Image (cartoon, helix red, strand yellow):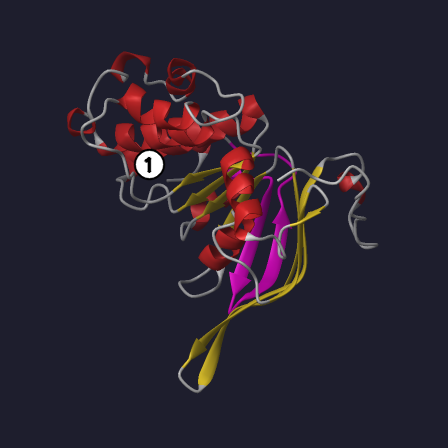
Amino acid sequence: MNPSSTATPAAPASAPSRDAGRELLFQARGLTKVYPSGEAEIRALDGVDLDLYRGELIVLLGASGSGKSTLLNILGGLDTPTGGTLTYRGSDLAGANEDGLTRFRRDAVGFVFQFYNLIPSLTARENVALITEIARAPMTPEAALALVELTDRQDHFPSQLSGGQQQRVAIARAIAKRPEVLLCDEPTGALDVKTGITVLEAIERVNLDLGTLTVLITHNSVLSDMADRVIHLSDGVIVDIRENKTRRSVRSLAW
């Protein structure tokens, strides 16, 4: 999706001064998502206001059903809101058609989920190449795998890799197209603590080295200290946004 050259979304009057000069990617105002449920309805999002900036690492916290995954899916163009506005680089994302959303997902967004979704018959390098072959200006599969420290495993098949290594291949695949946005939904949910730390370090490295806006869903509040901002959702509403003055490395967290 190509942003309009004239559209410059204004920051809200209450925005903190630290936002001045930063590159605004997403701006949501009054964002809602309603699902019908028999004669009732479920309000998965209920009036979310949010600005997200290039290079940030955001942790989304909240119980199951709080709206975290719904918000992530809307930010990634996998779903559309029922109401409110959402812009990406000034372009309307909430009202985009399916072709526009497809271009947005292809060009701007990388996804990492709890399950790796690798193709068993392809090597790590070949799994990553599936993305680099269709991206506009990708890095090589080898460079993407090097960024997640898997150079020595690039010719191995998924069955020859541990769970953490498979997840790092999935991260390499997601970032090989050099996305401005990396969306991670419980990327360590199926992993033990030691393996999860390795995966989180890969996500941390991508955020710092590529300047990618990274949004990470987790139930684990320990991860809060690795973020620039921690956004807590409950019943489809943002109930708290905490800004960390400094980020802690994944290894230094109190596991």
Residue 8: image quadrant is top right
> Measured along the vertical axis of the image, is residue 60 above or below residue 89?
below
Q: Residues within 10 Å of mark 1 (few under 14, many from 20)?
A: some
Q: Residue furthest bottom?
A: 39
Identify which residue, 165 or 172, lies in the foreground: 172
Identify which residue, 71 or 208, lies in the foreground: 71
Helix, strand or loop at mark 1 = helix
Residue range corresponding to the magenta coloring: 225-248
**Residue 131, x across and y down, in percent:** 40, 28
The amino acid type of the residue labelled 1 equals Gly
Which image quarter holds the N terminus?
top right
Q: Which residue is mark 1?
A: 196
**Residue 102, x across and y down, in percent:** 51, 44
> Measured along the vertical axis of the image, is residue 132 above or below residue 110?
above
Residue 251: image quadrant is top left
Residue 236 magenta-highlighted: yes
Residue 132 magenta-highlighted: no
Question: Is residue 131 left or right of 48 when viewed as pictured?
Answer: left
**Residue 50, x across and y down, in percent:** 66, 54
**Residue 164, x across and y down, in percent:** 28, 32
Which residue is found at the position 43% from the left and 40% from the top?
111
Identify which residue, 23 or 208, lies in the foreground: 23
Which residue is found at the position 27% from the left and 27% from the top?
165
Which image quarter holds the C terminus?
top left
